[in-house]
Image (cartoon, rainbow, N blue to C red):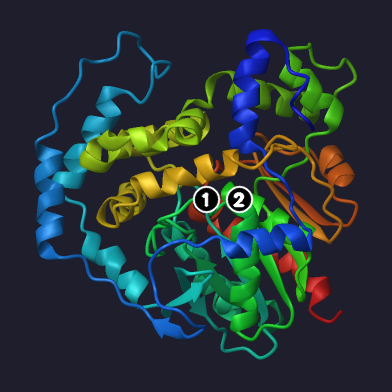
Amino acid sequence: MPWDFLLATRRQFLSATAGVLGFASATSAEAADTLAERTGGGGSSGAEIRPFHYHASDEDLADLKRRVRATRWPDKETVPDDTQGVQLATVQALARYWAAEHDWRKVEARINALPNFVTNIDSLDIHFIHVRSKHANALPLIVTHGWPGSVIEQLKIIEPLTNPTAHGGTEADAFDVVIPSLPGYGFSARPTAPGWHPVRIAQAWATLMQRLGYKRYVAQGGDWGNAVSEIMALQQPPGLLAISTNMAATVPPDIAMALATGAPPPANLTPDERRAWNQLDFFYKKGLGYANEMGLRPQTLYGIADSPVGLAAWILDHDDASQKLIARVFAGQSSGLTRDDILDNITLYWLTNTAISSARLYWDTRQIPAKGGFFDARGVQIPVAVSAFHDEIYTAPRSWSEKAYPKLLDYSAHPEGTHFAAWEQPMAVTEDLRKAFRSLRTA
């Protein structure tokens, strides 16, 4: 949905947002050639695939703990809820656990126990985990994380996808799993020049799957992972059979226009559609602060590169539902994630110094002339499966999904689950992927 019709103050706000959350599909050869000419930074040339191992220094870990303990705290919020941001009690509970109990070495060992690799694509070193199933005829799957996620977000789905017989499935459900780190995230190199946005990343992922020797494969993602997967679907690289998304882009043009112009919701919305409207309306009005800042001025965020607690608070405040879930976790409740889950991911951002480089993905994407909002239907023509989690930023209704994806393979609605589906609800994501792609294995 073009955003150039937006009016007055709302036009100024949402048009800026569209630059961050909207992007061009750029499927032409001309666009591909232009992107290929741009270069990033870091890494060797050539198509070799190199083993990768990570070990944080004891000095860096000690410095992290020291900085957490030395945090200068602001006053408590002046309201009894989180309407002013992540509450002081939540962040202080996180800091206490981080400084005294969290052990990075545990997740570091889990990561290093998996086959990790680096390969240079378009002049940038790309890290990825690659686990092949022991079962014959496993279906290759590339899974993409988003912000503020990382490959840690997908660790829980690797074993049930690659070893299904040990997790309620059959040999016929097996996948080979490829999980890359986005450019500027985690263990991938930090670009030294602009231009690494979802269009270019989608092309890089197709190169990666080709380099690994896969002739037929599928893709999955949420957040930026959905954007990358849907653009891959638009580009239709050789071998890509279908995609699956847990943050689908299904908003019809009339709904997108009404939301953008401040019009009331259409009277004929179903209950599921009206709930999706309400979620989107809330997000556009109250949930986009982080995206606007990273889309406009990511370099200004020096504080999150210098303060671990500042970084943690910034990451926690991604979306309302997941922020509330994390607050419950640090209040002592069991709620899908653990304190270690949350701090494993934040610590990865800290140790790799990727707070700013990851934020630049929003700025880079904003440089593409906007042709629609992040959640607007894009005209994907290859088969798509949708996993709709109840507390995602918005829960894509079945009716919108059927219109957005004419070759809808499967629609699975889940009564619980927030933005980080594979992390919080790994078996639900696993079962959805098994079910959705079963028909493609013999096609």
The label shown at residue 146 is: 1
Question: Where residue 92 sits: x, y (%)?
Answer: 21, 31
Query: What is the quadrant of residue 249 in the picture?
Result: top right
Which quadrant: the C terminus? bottom right
The local secondary structure at tag 1 comes to loop
Question: Would residue 74 appear left or right of 201 to someone viewing this image?
Answer: left
Which quadrant: the N terminus? top right
Residue 349 makes an appearance in the image: yes
Per the image, the residue denoted by label 2 is 222
Question: Where residue 127 sits: x, y (%)?
Answer: 44, 70
The local secondary structure at tag 2 comes to loop
34 or 20, nearer to the observer? 34
Question: Where residue 306 sits: x, y (%)?
Answer: 21, 40
Residue at left 36%, top 39%? 329
442 in relation to 201, above or below: below
310 in relation to 100, above or below: above
Residue at left 71%, top 81%? 172
Given the image, on which type of amino acid does mark 1 rest?
Answer: Gly
Question: Would residue 243 appear left or right of 184 to someone viewing this image?
Answer: right
Given the image, on which type of amino acid does mark 2 rest?
Answer: Gly
Residue 233 makes an appearance in the image: no
- Asked whether disc 1 touches disc 2, contact meaning CB atoms under 8 Å apart, the reply is yes
Residue at left 76%, top 76%? 239
The label shown at residue 204 is: none
Count residues near mark 2 (Cα–Cα under 10 Å), then give few for <14, some for 14-19, many for 20+: many
Q: How many marks?
A: 2
3 or 84, nearer to the observer? 3
Q: Earlier in the sequence, mark 1 or mark 2?
A: 1
State the CA–CA distance, disc 1 to disc 2: 7 Å
Question: Where residue 199 sits: x, y (%)?
Answer: 65, 55
